[in-house]
Amino acid sequence: MPRFFITIEYDGGDFVGWQRQDNGDSIQGQLEHAASAILGHRQDIPIQGAGRTDTGVHALGQVAHCDLPDGFTERQLPLALNAHLPPSIRVIKANIMADDAHARFDATMRRYRYRIHTRRIPSPLLSGRVWHFGQNLNVAAMHDAAQLLIGKHDFTSFRATHCQASSPIRTMDQINITEHNDEVHIAVSARSFLHHQVRNITGSLVLIGQGKWTNADLANALEQRQRSAAGQTAPAEGLYLTEVIYPYLTPVSTG
Amino acid sequence: MPRFFITIEYDGGDFVGWQRQDNGDSIQGQLEHAASAILGHRQDIPIQGAGRTDTGVHALGQVAHCDLPDGFTERQLPLALNAHLPPSIRVIKANIMADDAHARFDATMRRYRYRIHTRRIPSPLLSGRVWHFGQNLNVAAMHDAAQLLIGKHDFTSFRATHCQASSPIRTMDQINITEHNDEVHIAVSARSFLHHQVRNITGSLVLIGQGKWTNADLANALEQRQRSAAGQTAPAEGLYLTEVIYPYLTPVSTG
């Protein structure tokens, strides 16, 4: 049973999120269905994802692992799985890995991007792909303030009140905020994230961008260690899981 | 009755094209409905567009003109019209112009962009926004060959057989072909275009990009002056009307 890592792109708008749930279609559920389908539904194939994206959150490079019987190549597997997936989910790459490689536990870095659309009038062509904020933002001020969050902190103020992680301590490695025509992009990197962490950080950074908050207000929100001290939760539709990074230099085989 | 130029963004996938037709919703029809609605349906307001985009073709900067009773400002008009439009059409700007300014006849340049997605696996997040070609293309070769089309030519080989323009002669001002991650973009500029001209040029340029055609083949296709001499018509969903340019330096009023 070779272990495969698969890289997945999806439009989160069509699903209840990554994780299998009773109340609707999940990305994990669709992938497990597809993996079972390529084996003629003779066995269940569990799929373990690197990150549990919420309802509506997109992915350009989610990673998951699964074990499959011999015979699939790295080149064929994406096509085989895609034949059983809805068009809003596509497996874009497969790599054969060591038997104990783990998509969730071995990840050393996760990267997310949050897209904010600042033009007053919403864009039909970006509908469901960005947060339509509709106001100009001071990007330099946002970037500068965001650097206060870099490093190891208690992020209680920026995690969902129902977040189930045992510790609110996380280490933020990078936050880069850049402007792209009518969009502001917030790119964040960390080994792992708390529930809603990127969306809650975004909700506070726009207060900086609007001039409603100073750097001291952001530092204070962090110190308070309570969710109500920080800004709103930015909507799911602007968030993308862009990349998951592993320490393995190269996959075991190139297929 | 001040004359307004309105700039419009739309997702062409939801419509039968720009032009009012009996067989479905058109962008022009929706705009005329909205313009009448803001006047309490007391009068019909004809909307004259700069370019007639086909079914499925998108616009980032279509321009149209209409005459409205006194009282609307440049800032209010987009909001008023958008309140009566489906989310896949948005008026993003309005400018009060001279009474004889004409969105179609006064345009000195139209710019289109064609987006080709070259990754083997289609992208869920670009669905309906690009032509999924699925193969690598030699972008430098495409750009080089495309320069053969610059200038004044008989473009019979590149216009739809049912094109109703009285002359097949057009002057191509610019064709720039560039690479953006997994996409190839073909940006073209001319005073005016024949029916399907950009899509038919794209269909021939991909033959160059695949190495199936040489520059001599493209030159020969142009010289033949028959549609069958050139490549396929690229699909509508990759095409965007990006900008329409007028000789007026500034609008008459800034509202």
Image (cartoon, coloured by chain):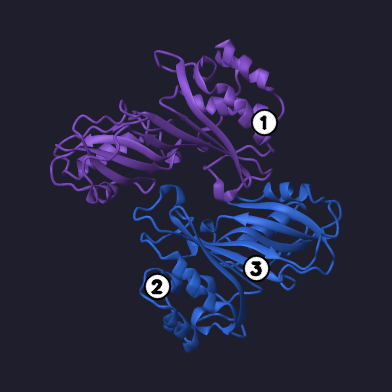
Chain colours: A purple, B blue
Q: Which residue is mark 3?
A: B110
At label 3, the amino acid type is Arg
x then y, percent, for residue A58: 44, 39
- Earlier in the chain: of badge 3 and badge 2, it is 3
Mark 3 closeness class: few <14, some 14–19, many ≥20 residues within 10 Å: many
Observer-side mark, 3 or 2, equals 2
Residue at 69%, 60% (x, y): give it.
B32
Front one among A31 and A93: A93
Q: Secondary structure at mark 1?
A: helix
Q: Secondary structure at mark 2?
A: helix
At label 2, the amino acid type is Leu
Residue B16 lies left or right of residue B78; in this view the side is: left
The number of discs equals 3
Q: Secondary structure at mark 3?
A: strand
Given the current orientation, which residue lies at the most extreme front position? Answer: A249
Residue at 51%, 28% (x, y): give it.
A198
At label 1, the amino acid type is Ala
Quadrant of the snapshot with the N terminus of chain B: bottom right
x then y, percent, for residue A120: 69, 43
* Chain hosting mark 3: B
Q: Are marks 3 and 2 on the same chain?
A: yes
Q: Which residue is mark 1?
A: A141
Q: Which residue is mark 2?
A: B207
x then y, percent, for residue A177: 58, 35
Residue at 23%, 35% (x, y): give it.
A66
Give the image quarter of residue B230. bottom left
Residue at 29%, 34% (x, y): give it.
A248
Q: Are marks 1 and 2 on the same chain?
A: no
